[in-house]
Amino acid sequence: MIDSKEADAGAKRTLVEEGTEVKGSIRSTCPLLVRGRIEGDIDAPSMTISPSGAVHGKVKVGELKSDGEIAGEFNAETVQLSGTVKDKTVLRARTLEVKLESKESRHQVLFGECELEVGEPPTREKRKKGGDQDPKPEGSPEPTG
């Protein structure tokens, strides 16, 4: 979450307040704080989703912190999750941190049917050189053709 010191210092941010629903594209050069609901494409340096917030769509951010609900396709450098990830969500991140939340002495983060990709994807050069391939089992026949 964006702390109160940052907010008090007059730091710029884009805010979608609780009770507000936005449909469409958002592109911001400021951090985005979502307390309401957004459906659409988002491009911002960072995004924080509060427990009352929900973001459904295609998102590209440097940093994602979510205590709310996410659904869609998310691309970020770093991700901190402690909310709900809905079905058919794709989450791509260099680093992923999942925080357990205590609600009535239960620890949980809810994941629907989703796809998580964490770390660097293999590059084509590495694949061609065999850097990411398993070694060929001993005694395997050579490919023909």
Image: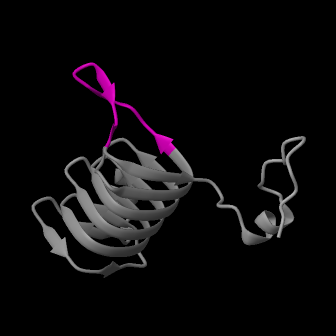
Q: Is residue 64 magenta?
A: no
Viewer-proximal residue among 25 and 46: 25
For the C terminus, the image quarter is bottom right
Give the residue at x 14% y 59%. Answer: 18
Report how many numbered discs are placed on residues in the image. Answer: 0
Give the residue at x 38% y 50%. Answer: 114
Single out the residue that lies furthest toward the top: 105
Q: Is residue 46 left or right of residue 137?
A: left
Q: In the rendered structure, which segment of residues is drawn in magenta?
A: 97-111
Single out the residue that lies furthest toward the front: 145
According to the image, what is the colour scheme of the structure? Answer: one colour
Viewer-proximal residue among 54 and 90: 90
Give the residue at x 22% y 55%. Answer: 53
Residue 38 percent location from the top left of the image? 22, 67
Residue 77 percent location from the top left of the image? 55, 61
Q: Is residue 144 left or right of residue 82?
A: right
Q: Is residue 110 magenta?
A: yes
Residue 82 percent location from the top left of the image? 36, 41
Q: Is residue 137 left or right of residue 68?
A: right
Q: Is residue 8 visible?
A: no
Single out the residue that lies furthest toward the left: 19
Viewer-proximal residue among 130 and 29: 130
Q: Is residue 94 visible?
A: yes
Residue 15 percent location from the top left of the image? 26, 68
Give the residue at x 27% y 49%. Answer: 68
What secondary structure is the stretch in magenta mostly built from? strand
